[in-house]
Amino acid sequence: QELLRVMRTIDDRIVHELNTTIPTASFVGQVDAGQTCRELHQALTDAHTSRERIIKNCIAQTSSVVKTLREEREKAQDDVSLLKQLRKEQTKLKLMQSELNVEEVVNDRSWKVLS
C-alpha cells in the first residue's frame, strides 16, 4: 500500500503538473507545449500500467497462498493457527482487489483533468 501511495504521486499532483508544464502566454515561444503534454501523458500512462501490473501480481500471489492454505485447511480442520493465517491472507486478497477499484477511480480522475 505504501508503494502504491508513492506511485500515485503523479496522479495526486496532476493539476500541479499541468500548471507547471503548460506555458503561460509569456513563455509560449520558449516551451513546446505539445511535446510537454505528450511527455506528461506518457508518464501518466506508464504509471497507470505499472501500478495495475503490480496490483495484479500481488493479487495472483495472494490468491495462490489462499488456495494453498485452503487445501491445507481441508486436511487439518482443527488447526486454529492455520485458520487465522487463512483469514489474514483472505483479508489481504480483498484489500488488493479493492485497490484495483481505487486505481480505476484515480486513473479516471487523472484522465479527466488531463483532457
Image (cartoon, grey):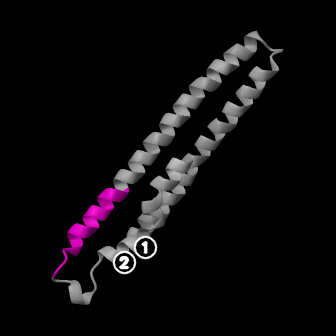
- Please identify the quadrant where the C terminus is shown: bottom left
Q: Amino acid at mark 1?
A: Val
Q: Is residue 32 depicted above or below 90 in this figure?
A: below
How far is mark 2 from mark 1, CA to CA? 6 Å
The image quarter containing residue 17 is bottom left
Q: Which mark is residue 19?
A: 2
Q: Is residue 59 above or below residue 22?
A: above
**Residue 16, placed above or below residue 8:** below
Q: Is residue 103 left or right of residue 70?
A: left
Q: Main secondary structure of the magenta part?
A: helix
Span of residues in magenta? 30-44
Among all residues in the image, which is located at the extreme left?
29
Tell me if 81 is positioned left or right of 28 in this view. Answer: right
Q: Horizontal and vertical percent for residue 64?
A: 57, 24
Circle 1 Cα neighbour tier, 10 Å, few/some/many (<14 / 14–19 / ≥20):
some
Marking on residue 15: 1
Secondary structure found at label 2 = helix
Q: Residue 84 appears at what percent x and percent y?
A: 77, 27
* Helix, strand or loop under label 1: helix
Q: Pick out the residue farthest to the bottom.
A: 26
Nearer the observer, 10 or 56: 10
Q: Residue at x 47, y 57 (%)?
A: 8
In the rendering, at what x and y percent does residue 52 appear?
A: 46, 45
Q: Total marks drawn?
A: 2
Magenta segment includes 28: no
Q: Is residue 88 above or below residue 70?
A: below
Circle 2 packing at 10 Å, graded few (<14), some (14-19), many (20+), is: few
Q: Residue at x 74, y 16 (%)?
A: 73
Q: Which residue is at a point 39% across and 53% down the rendered structure image?
A: 47
